[in-house]
Image (spheres, helix red, strand yellow):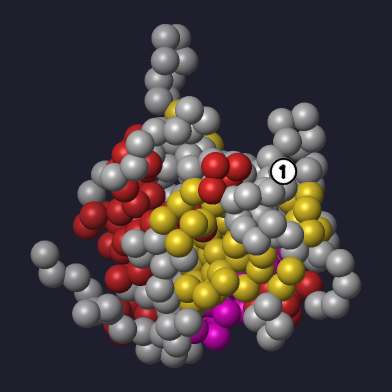
């Protein structure tokens, strides 16, 4: 299969961004298969695209495509991508057993998300992974996940509360990281909604924020040619603070800067 060179695609994206002043940022979406009298539906929490628009980007929602060539075509036109949160990745796809607490993502969405994640990495497309999107980036780069936090982390704190949709916890942040630029000094509290977490962090990522129990809550790419961020918490949700929005601002600013630089396809 022949693909357009990434240099050409990035040049086109740069010209288009220059016309509007706004980068085009893709968003994947959730999917629910048809059941009984209900049709299949695709949906997306508005916080994702609202935050991107507030940050000065144009969000482009991408449905769960079937063909790799179609994913390649879409990525050629986009300046970056936000991988959204959602249900659990199927651990059997990574040679692990199902956990009793696993709530599986729909297979159609997961098929697409994994294909999309690999394509994003191969093209070094700027990416922000949120929640399950962060976990996806780690998995496609051969990292591992804890299937249920209390099983792998002694003295783990609550990271999810069904009775409190605004559940938050504090963070410890790596100095001089992107997350540090977002939050600055003072206590940091973020919206937490997960029972899975990163266990072994994949290369080329480095952890930049941790929960009090040591669980990784954010990472950044150390590859100078790939602008990639992952956050386990949810800066787009209704429980997020004004400071959380800075993650979208930093991502969009990074995409703008990256569009001025030539990007290469990973060998």
Q: Which quarter of the image is occupied by the N terminus?
A: bottom left
Task: Describe residue 175's horizontal placement relative to residue 124 as left or right.
Answer: right
Q: Residues within 10 Å of mark 1 (few under 14, many from 20)?
A: some
Instruction: Kindly identify the residue that appears in the image at 23 percent across and 55 percent down.
Output: 68
- Classify residue 70 by image quadrant: bottom left
Nearer to us in this view, 226 or 69: 226
Q: Which residue is most to the top?
A: 36
Residue at the image position 79 percent from the left and 35 percent from the top: 164
Give me the residue at 46% from left, 52% from top: 145
Coordinates of residue 205 in the picture (x, y in percent): 47, 73
Furthest toward the left, the residue is 1
In front of the other: 218 or 105:
218
Residue 240 seen:
no
The answer to whether residue 236 is above or below residue 266 is above
Tag 1, which secondary structure? loop
Tell whether 196 sits left or right of 75.
Answer: right
Residue 254 within the segment the image draws in magenta: yes
Residue designated by label 1: 158
The quarter of the picture where residue 69 lies is bottom left
Residue sitting at 32 percent across and 73 percent down? 123
The magenta span reads: 245-258
Rendered view: 237 above or below 39: below
In this picture, residue 204 sits left or right of residue 171: left
Is residue 149 found inside the magenta-colored segment of the image? Answer: no
Q: 225 and 68: which one is in front?
A: 225
Q: What predominant SS class does the magenta segment belong to?
A: helix
């Amino acid at each position: 299969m022949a693909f357009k060179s990434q240099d050409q695609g990035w040049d086109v994206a740069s010209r288009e961004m220059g016309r509007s002043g706004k980068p085009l940022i893709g968003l994947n979406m959730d999917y629910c298969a048809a059941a009984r009298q209900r049709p299949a539906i695709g949906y997306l929490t508005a916080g994702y695209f609202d935050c991107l628009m507030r940050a000065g980007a144009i969000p482009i929602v991408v449905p769960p495509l079937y063909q790799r060539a179609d994913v390649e075509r879409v990525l050629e036109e986009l300046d970056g991508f936000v991988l959204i949160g959602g249900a659990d990745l199927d651990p059997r796809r990574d040679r692990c057993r199902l956990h009793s607490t696993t709530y599986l993502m729909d297979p159609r969405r997961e098929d697409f998300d994994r294909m999309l994640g690999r394509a994003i990495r191969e093209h070094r497309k700027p990416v922000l992974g949120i929640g399950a999107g962060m976990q996806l980036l780690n998995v496609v780069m051969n990292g591992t996940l804890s299937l249920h936090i209390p099983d792998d982390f002694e003295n783990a704190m609550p990271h999810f509360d069904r009775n409190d949709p605004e559940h938050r916890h504090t963070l410890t942040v790596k100095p001089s990281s992107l997350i540090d630029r977002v939050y600055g000094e003072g206590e940091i509290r973020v919206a937490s909604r997960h029972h899975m977490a990163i266990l072994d962090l994949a290369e080329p990522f480095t952890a930049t924020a941790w929960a009090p129990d040591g669980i990784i809550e954010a990472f950044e790419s150390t590859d100078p040619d790939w602008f990639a961020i992952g956050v386990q918490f949810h800066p787009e949700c209704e429980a997020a603070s004004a400071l959380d929005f800075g993650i979208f601002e930093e991502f969009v600013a990074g995409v703008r800067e990256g569009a001025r630089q030539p990007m290469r396809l990973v060998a």
